[in-house]
Image: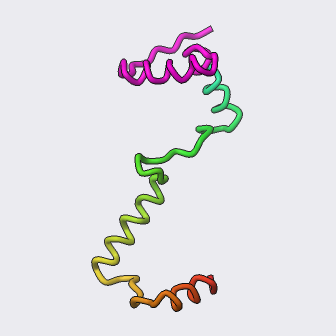
Amino acid sequence: MSTIQIRIKDSTKKSAKKVLDKIGLDMSSAVKLYIHQIILHQGIPFRLVTENGLTPTEEEEILQAEHDAEQGKNVTKAMSQKEALAYLRKL
């Protein structure tokens, strides 16, 4: 057996404990489950997102598109509602 020690904010630990108590798990069992899921998935067993709910790649693409638009690149002319719907139907 091995031991893992981690440092975490008290408020984060308390919040996690409340959730785990509701589902009947202690912190140690939850961490063990997480580690087993990492092994089964051969990686992080969930989608990693930023505080905006986007993946880092998606967020970077949006920021790049914003930058391009500010530079006048990859910008289309304004469309009416009818034109926009026709354009979207073609995709």
Q: Which residue is nearer to you in this view: 49 or 41?
A: 49
Q: Quadrant of the N terminus?
A: top right
User: Measuring 39% from the left and 21% from the top, which residue is drawn there?
Assistant: 8
Q: Residue at x 67, y 26 (%)?
A: 36
Q: Indicate left or right for 63 with 19 as reference.
A: left
The image quarter in which residue 31 lies: top right
- Residue, x 40% and y 82% (percent of image)? 74
User: 12 above or below 54?
Assistant: above
**How far from the left and from the top, in percent, is residue 76?**
41, 87
Asked whether residue 2 is drawn in magenta, I would say yes
Q: State the quadrant of the C terminus.
A: bottom right
Q: Position of residue 67 (x, y in %)?
A: 31, 71
**Percent position (x, y) of residue 32?**
62, 19
**Span highlighted in magenta in the image:** 1-30
Q: Residue furthest top?
A: 1
| In the depicted structure, whether residue 76 falls above or below residue 45 | below
Where residue 79 appears, x then y in whole percent? Answer: 44, 89
Residue 36 located within the stretch drawn in magenta = no
The front one of 62 and 19 is 19
Residue 6 is left or right of residue 89, and the answer is left
What secondary structure is the stretch in magenta mostly built from? helix
